[in-house]
Amino acid sequence: MNAIPSISSQIDEKIIFKVIDKYFSRLMPHYYKWINSWLIGAYENYADIDKYIILIYIINKDFIFFRRNGLIVDYDTFYKDKSLEVDKINISDISKDLQIPKESVRRKVAELEKANVIIKKGKKFFITRTAFTTTQANLTLKNMTALLCEFNKILEDEKIVKVAYQSTEISDSIKKNFSFVWYQFYKFLFIFTNRFRKELGDLETFTIGALVLLNAAENKTFKVKEFDRKKYMISIQDSGERGVNAMSLAEITGIPRTTVIRKLKDLIKKDLLQINEKNLITLNMRGKSFKKIQRLQDQNMLSLSNFISRAFNQLKITN
């Protein structure tokens, strides 16, 4: 660091929220892809998203330790060893923080230990290399970079910043500040997943529903340029022809087709999805269900604003 960072150069979280709200249509395809890819990857590892979240909760204790002691560990250093020593596992804390029943947490931790994902040596606990590799952040890093890059371009367009960083600069800065950024990411992720687990019952159901939303957002016939959040959500309601079938959802997520069909029926019953005349699954965000999604969206955008403010301001300070 060649100079003391200027306090006035940081971007306020309220400004970030306003930018997200105004340029929702530009940011949301990147946001949905980032979240969906992470959830699909989580399921792919253990066929159980909650089990994967419990694992990263345990790993996150190390990020908390680094942060508490004023340490920032870069990406390459964090992943170079054969195992990672972690803090003592407290079932009650995991259950409370992740809002997963205590007995479910106990069972999933036992399964991770049986699979040698978690190993106890004396009084110490370690995450083994195999599991450590499954949590490696390559794709998430790529998708996070794409989101922050688009956000940075918008800030330049709005003349909030003078220069937009290149994609490689953002990626390199995240790697350099890996433990800091990933602590912020996991904090966002735990809040986000707790919210939707409570609303829908499980995260596999949310993953399937979110994939239907992503399909609508990325479909070439849905061409939205500069819609704010309200206009975007109203516009995407009329995406009846942009559907997807259960087999495609099963192939993309890795969730068995019978399970996908069962969870689709639940989402249809909740008036969040519908079947169109082509027998494809589409969004159905109207009436009470639309208001419910808007409420969740409001909460999520506040959480996202908090994450971006922490990550992006760190990037500005260290570049």
Image (spheres, rainbow, N blue to C red):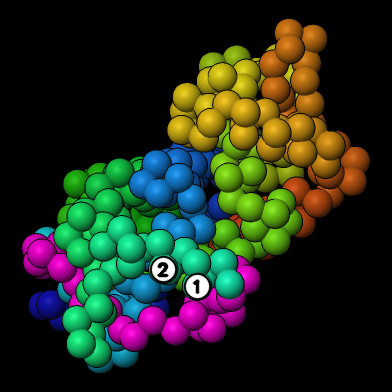
Question: Disc 2 residue type?
Answer: Ala
Taking the image as shown, residue 58 lies to the left or right of residue 190, namely left
Q: Give the magenta-colored segment's residue range.
A: 77-102
- Inspect this view and state whether residue 7 appears: no
Task: Determine the CA span between mark 2 and mark 1.
Answer: 6 Å
Tell which of 16 and 182 is nearer to you: 182
Taking the image as shown, residue 17 lies to the left or right of residue 133, namely right
Tell which of 184 and 319 is nearer to you: 184
What percent of the width, then of the height, locates residue 121? 19, 81
- Inspect this view and state whether residue 267 appears: yes
Taking the image as shown, residue 163 lies to the left or right of residue 247, namely left
Question: Disc 1 residue type?
Answer: Arg
Tell which of 112 and 165 is nearer to you: 112
Which SS class for mark 1?
Answer: helix
Query: Mark 2 sits on what residue?
Result: 110
What percent of the width, then of the height, locates residue 125? 26, 79
Residue in view at x 48 percent, y 50 percent: 48
User: Image quadrant of residue 112?
Assistant: bottom left
What percent of the width, then of the height, locates residue 113? 33, 67
Residue in view at x 57 percent, y 61 percent: 192
What percent of the width, then of the height, locates residue 124? 23, 85
Taking the image as shown, residue 40 lies to the left or right of residue 205, namely left
Whether residue 225 is in magenta: the answer is no
Vertically, is 107 above or below 214?
Answer: below
On residue 106, the disc is 1
Tell which of 243 and 260 is nearer to you: 260
Residue in view at x 36 percent, y 47 percent: 45
Q: Do the residues under discs 2 and 1 have CB atoms within 8 angstroms? A: yes
Which SS class for mark 2?
Answer: helix
How crowded pointer 2 is (Cα within 10 Å; few <14, some 14-19, many 20+) is rated as some
